[in-house]
């Protein structure tokens, strides 16, 4: 066999081996890692969407708290007076409440008032027959053991999913005895799903779990989902990843299948880059082969052998930071540089993956305090800490609900985001822990997750700065916003709720009383309890408001925080 033929065969075999190694390395390391990372990212995305569903259910339930704990309702469930219906349950009021189902059931199980409501047509209709089967005396919807009992969740009504909240009927003070049950429902229709899609910024689709005509991909997802595995992901095509979640009804039975369509942006970029790399390598290989056939020198063959050996070593070790040695300025050198460019591209793609992982870390730290996030990453279970003395602040924008009916959703969100962003900056300045926002309410605490001696002073300064910041905001934007602020000091329990869709939250009487200080406060003022007053009275100015009745606690002495004492201001200046 001639040398040229041997050379041609050698180059051809080497080139084929080189391409195979590079393709294997890129497919195994890059696409394999990307596929796993894509599944994990998609799983987290579905969990985030489920958090939105959970928050939507909680918001729906809390919207009607005042209806079940209301003296007028408490009286109506006994005497069924028509004035209550004419004043509160007319189509205009139900449209404002955005409900499709209202049921008043007395303690004997009798329906005092019940209707379904077509919001778009504003028509009252009878309660569906298939809903009545859930209203037996021992039904979860009707049976409430105590005044704190309530049931929220999903129920299939008329083959359509409906958000349901069931609460015991109590007095305005939240006291019993329980006289019956109040049930509100809202269909989870396409408009609501569209709104949730806009919030999550991802296309969402739901189908009934027992729908015999569901799409094939939902049928496949249903076979993988179970009580233990509530989320499953699979590629729908080259452009989209489908994330599926199982939603249960109020009885804990499968009710809905949710699909989140997640774009496969990173995967597409990786596939494109891989294709470009392979094409580039093939082009370089053709040029290289032509030049090699003309040279027929052992130096060229030797360099080719060395090149093949280095590439194989990189493929074996998987170390993409290594580079092929480049000698001279001929075609073999060009091939070596192309391989190095390919390795650099692969290395950069892996760095991008690490960058995405760091973004996930930052997102986790946005949700949880750093010490709590570290404990979760160490797979610590049941995170719950007791703190002997913490100061909690609740703030609520006065009249924001009425404003929401007068302006567009975008303007509403922009205003709320602007105001809460100001509060977030103040929380950072005073080194406080923001707990959460609930609608137009804002909650922050001092003394967690690490104890600090000046927790009450930090909250007091935060409250005064919030009032001043809102005044400046009103001046700059020509608005007339006002807030109520409530503060309380005492022991709390702090921890992470659940194992999925977790949130760092506080519990205890201290939190409840701080919330009552805000809800029963005076717009434009900071109302504090006697506990907080005793800590701050030497450094801050207060005005005694007197005794006010606190739900569940009776009469409590409260004070209004007016500012810092002159001596303290002089120390600061």
Image (cartoon, rainbow, N blue to C red):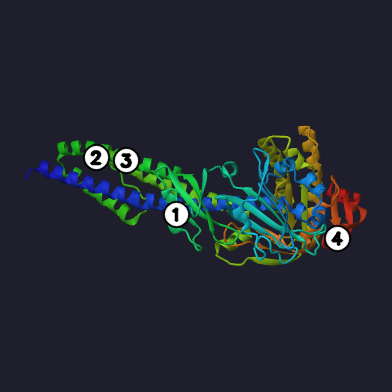
Look at discs 2 and 4 and give the one toward the viewer: 4
Residue 266 visible? The answer is yes
Q: Which residue is mark 2?
A: 285
* Label drawn at residue 140: none
Residue that appears at 54% across and 61% down: 253
Return the disc, 1 or 3, that comes first in the chain's sequence: 1
Q: Position of residue 297 (x, y in %)?
A: 15, 42
Residue 454, image quadrant: bottom right
Q: Which residue is mark 1?
A: 221
Look at discs 1 and 4 and give the one toward the viewer: 1
Q: Position of residue 35 (x, y in %)?
A: 41, 51
Spatial separation of the CA atoms under disc 1 and disc 3:
43 Å
Drawn side of residue 378 relative to residue 214, left or right: right
Residue 538 visible? The answer is no
Spatial separation of the CA atoms under disc 3 and disc 2:
10 Å
Q: Secondary structure at mark 3?
A: helix
Residues packed near mark 4 inside 10 Å, few (<14), some (14 to 19) or many (20 plus) = some
Look at discs 1 and 2 and give the one toward the viewer: 1
Disc 1 and disc 2 in contact, CB within 8 angstroms = no
Return the disc, 4 or 3, that comes first in the chain's sequence: 3
Q: Which residue is mark 3?
A: 338
Return the disc, 3 or 2, that comes first in the chain's sequence: 2
Q: Position of residue 480 (x, y in %)?
A: 81, 36
Q: Secondary structure at mark 4?
A: helix
Spatial separation of the CA atoms under disc 1 and disc 4:
57 Å
Spatial separation of the CA atoms under disc 4 and disc 3:
70 Å
Q: Quadrant of the N terminus?
A: top left
Spatial separation of the CA atoms under disc 2 and disc 4:
79 Å
Residues packed near mark 3 inside 10 Å, few (<14), some (14 to 19) or many (20 plus) = some
Which residue is more in the foreground, 65 or 444?
65
Return the disc, 2 or 4, that comes first in the chain's sequence: 2
Residue 502, image quadrant: bottom right
């Amino acid at each position: 066999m001639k040398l040229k033929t041997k050379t041609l065969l050698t180059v051809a075999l080497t080139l084929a081996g080189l391409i195979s190694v590079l393709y294997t390395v890129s497919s195994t390391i890059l696409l394999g890692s990307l596929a796993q990372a894509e599944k994990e990212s998609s799983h987290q995305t579905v969990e985030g969407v489920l958090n939105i569903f959970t928050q939507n259910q909680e918001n729906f339930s809390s919207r009607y708290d005042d209806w079940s704990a209301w003296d007028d309702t408490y009286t109506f469930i006994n005497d069924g007076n028509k004035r209550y219906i004419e004043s509160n349950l007319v189509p205009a009021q139900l449209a404002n409440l955005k409900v499709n189902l209202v049921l008043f059931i007395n303690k004997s199980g009798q329906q005092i008032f019940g209707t379904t409501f077509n919001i778009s047509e504003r028509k009252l209709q009878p309660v569906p027959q298939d809903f009545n089967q859930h209203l037996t005396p021992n039904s979860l919807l009707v049976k409430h053991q105590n005044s704190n009992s309530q049931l929220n969740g999903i129920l299939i009504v008329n083959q359509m999913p409906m958000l349901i909240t069931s609460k015991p009927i109590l007095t305005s003070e939240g006291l019993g005895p329980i006289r019956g049950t109040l049930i509100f429902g809202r269909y989870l229709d396409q408009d609501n799903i569209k709104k949730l899609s806009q919030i999550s910024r991802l296309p969402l689709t739901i189908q009934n779990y027992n729908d015999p005509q569901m799409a094939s991909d939902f049928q496949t997802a249903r076979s993988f989902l179970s009580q233990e595995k509530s989320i499953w992901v699979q590629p729908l095509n080259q452009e989209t990843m489908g994330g599926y979640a199982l939603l249960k009804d109020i009885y804990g039975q499968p009710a809905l299948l949710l699909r989140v369509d997640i774009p496969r942006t990173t995967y597409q970029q990786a596939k494109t880059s891989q294709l470009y790399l392979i094409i580039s390598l093939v082009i370089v290989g053709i040029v290289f082969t032509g030049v090699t056939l003309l040279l027929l020198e052992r130096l060229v063959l030797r360099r080719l052998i060395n090149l093949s050996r280095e590439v194989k070593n990189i493929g074996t070790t998987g170390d993409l930071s290594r580079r092929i040695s480049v000698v001279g300025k001929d075609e073999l050198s060009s091939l070596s540089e192309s391989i190095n460019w390919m390795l650099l591209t692969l290395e950069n793609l892996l760095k991008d993956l690490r960058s995405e992982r760091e973004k996930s870390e930052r997102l986790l730290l946005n949700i949880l305090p750093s010490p709590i996030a570290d404990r979760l990453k160490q797979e610590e279970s049941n995170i719950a800490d007791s703190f002997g003395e913490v100061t909690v602040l609740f703030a609520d924008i006065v009249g924001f609900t009425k404003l929401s009916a007068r302006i567009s959703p975008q303007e509403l969100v922009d205003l709320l985001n602007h105001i809460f962003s100001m509060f977030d900056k103040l929380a950072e300045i005073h080194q406080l822990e923001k707990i959460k926002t609930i609608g137009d309410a804002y909650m922050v605490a001092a003394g967690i997750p690490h104890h600090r001696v000046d927790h009450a002073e930090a909250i007091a300064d935060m409250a005064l700065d919030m009032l001043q910041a809102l005044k400046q905001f009103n001046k700059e934007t020509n608005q007339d916003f006002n807030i109520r602020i409530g503060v309380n000091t005492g022991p709390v329990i702090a921890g992470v709720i659940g194992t999925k869709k977790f949130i760092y939250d506080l519990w205890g009487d201290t939190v409840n009383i701080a919330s009552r200080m805000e809800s029963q406060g005076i717009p434009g003022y900071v109302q504090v309890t006697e506990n907080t007053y005793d800590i701050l009275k030497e450094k801050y100015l207060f005005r005694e408001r007197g005794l006010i009745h606190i739900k569940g606690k009776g009469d409590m002495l409260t004070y209004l925080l007016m500012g810092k004492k002159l001596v303290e201001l002089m120390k600061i200046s």
